[in-house]
Image (tube, rainbow, N blue to C red):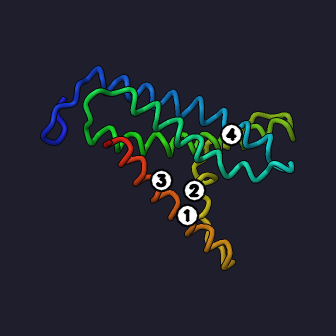
């Protein structure tokens, strides 16, 4: 396949996509369940680190799945990282509704729950500050993923 000016090998790209999808869905869902179990306990502050655990696991796994670097791999790695974070949130909502109401709520797949700050404006100064902080963290992590894929 030809993207840009360099050649991307089809088997390498398919392996990279498979590794990314499996890592994002499976490990993201697993971290979402861990996130759910830690919520409301004395260990609730560890929920902050689930995104970093996902980041380190996914970047290491994706970096080992190709031999020759291409810009497409960096872009896809950032996409898979956000997909994994989306599955962390989705699996946490599904676990919450299953254990509280004994139903599997498929409305958890609604992206509005994941991107809450983009759809609903809050006039609270602290909420605005936290939303801007989250955007800054996502930008820094995206840049870091891009550079780690490139190394």
Residue wearing tag 2: 115
Q: Earlier in the sequence, mark 3 or mark 1?
A: 1
- In whole angstroms, how far apart are the C-alphas of marks 2 and 4? 16 Å
Q: Quadrant of residue 35?
A: top right
Res 29 quadrant in image: top right
- Write down the residue under mark 4: 32
81 sits left or right of 88 in the view: left
Question: Between marks 1 and 2, how big is the CA–CA gap?
Answer: 6 Å
Percent of width and height locating residue 90: 65, 42
Query: Where is mark 1, residue-wise?
Result: 118
Q: Are marks 1 and 2 in contact (CB under 8 Å)?
A: yes
Q: Name the residue at 56% across, 32% down.
A: 25
Q: CA distance from mark 3 to mark 1?
A: 19 Å
Q: Are marks 3 and 1 in contact (CB under 8 Å)?
A: no
Q: Secondary structure at mark 3?
A: helix
Kind of element beneath mark 1: helix
Label 4 vs label 1: CA separation? 21 Å
Q: Percent position (x, y) of residue 93?
A: 72, 43
**Who's the residue at 29% across and 27% down the image?**
67
Q: Please give the residue where the numbered disc 3 appears in the rendered image.
A: 141
Q: Nearer the viewer, mark 2 or mark 3?
A: 3
């Amino acid at each position: 396949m030809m993207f840009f000016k360099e050649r991307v090998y089809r088997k390498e790209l398919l392996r990279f996509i498979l590794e990314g999808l499996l890592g994002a869905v499976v490990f993201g869902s697993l971290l979402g369940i861990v996130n759910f179990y830690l919520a409301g306990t004395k260990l609730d502050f560890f929920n902050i680190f689930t995104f970093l655990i996902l980041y380190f696991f996914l970047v290491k796994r994706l970096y080992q799945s190709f031999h020759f670097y291409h810009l497409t791999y960096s872009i896809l790695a950032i996409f898979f990282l956000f997909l994994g974070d989306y599955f962390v949130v989705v699996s946490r909502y599904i676990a919450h509704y299953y254990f509280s109401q004994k139903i599997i709520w498929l409305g958890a797949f609604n992206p509005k729950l994941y991107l809450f700050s983009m759809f609903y404006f809050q006039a609270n100064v602290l909420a605005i500050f936290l939303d801007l902080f989250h955007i800054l963290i996502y930008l820094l992590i995206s840049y870091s993923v891009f550079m780690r894929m490139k190394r």
